[in-house]
Image (cartoon, rainbow, N blue to C red):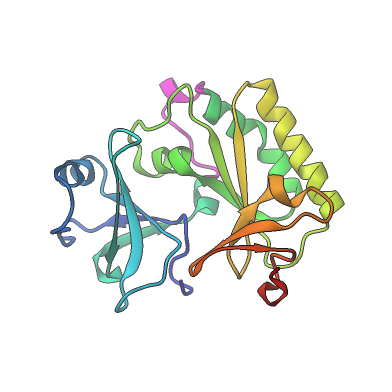
Amino acid sequence: MGSLVNPHDLLRLKADACVFADAPAWVAASLERAPFVVVRRARAIDGRVAIGIRGAVRSERFGSWIGLQHVEAVLTPEMLKSAKPHQNRADLPAFNLLQAITSICDASELAWGPAGSVGFELASERATVTDQSDLDLLMRAPEPLDRPEAKLLFDALSAAAFERAIRIDVQIETHEGAFSLAEFVHPGARVMLRSADGPKLIADPWQTSRAA
């Protein structure tokens, strides 16, 4: 994806951003409410970045590509971890959990931040999170993780989520792609690495040449 943008980054589009000619009708209305798109995990095409647009309901999702000349700002998950929701929405379970696990994530010494609906609302200030929303986290691990230490991290995050009766989904990002922390913590288990070239079931997420 390059050094400018990466999967899960949120891009704020310029006012004169191009129109997606092949988009369904709801896309224009959604971008008018909140001119943000998310970077998808896919190869760039002719210098254009793969992006996704979310609508008002889960069924409204649209994928396309856009040139970075149409982007006003890039907001990474790491930039959003300290952002605050509107005061009257701070008690929603997903925001409450994000605040609760901040010290746990910081102690891991990995770069991290919220993705999914939580990240989108913190970036766009558009109400997106609901009472039923999960908390999606991205944690960056350019170097291999120790599985026992990863298990301790997973257990601590899972306990905080269980206490609040919501689900937490932690994706570990490497130079090769991303995989689920929940899969990785099982000793000897292979994980599904999501890369720009598609999913790969592998034993070592940091070395795809060992793919099984």
Residue located at (70% from left, 44% from top): 182
Task: Look at the picture and state if 128 lies above or below 11.
Answer: above
- For the image, the number of numbered tags is 0
Residue 172 visible, this angle = no
Q: Quadrant of residue 121?
A: top left
The magenta-colored residue range is: 81-92
Q: Looking at the picture, how far across and down is residue 211, in whole percent? A: 69, 70
Image quadrant where one finds the C terminus:
bottom right
Q: Looking at the picture, how far across and down is residue 20, in whole percent? A: 17, 58
In the shown orientation, is residue 68 left or right of residue 106? left
Q: Looking at the picture, how far across and down is residue 122, in whole percent? A: 43, 40
In the shown orientation, is residue 112 left or right of residue 159? left
In the shown orientation, is residue 21 left or right of residue 135? left
Q: Quadrant of residue 142?
A: bottom right
Task: Look at the picture and state if 185 lies above or below 121.
Answer: below
Residue located at (70% from left, 73% from top): 207
Residue 161 visible, this angle = yes
Magenta stretch, main secondary structure class = loop
| Residue 186 forms part of the magenta stretch | no
Residue located at (29% from left, 79% from top): 46
In the shown orientation, is residue 120 left or right of residue 93? left
Task: Look at the picture and state if 2 lies above or below 84.
Answer: below
Q: Looking at the picture, how far across and down is residue 110, in whole percent? A: 69, 56
Q: Quadrant of residue 157?
A: top right
| Residue 85 forms part of the magenta stretch | yes
Q: Name the one closer to the observer, 39 or 13.
A: 39
Task: Look at the picture and state if 164 lies above or below 151.
Answer: above
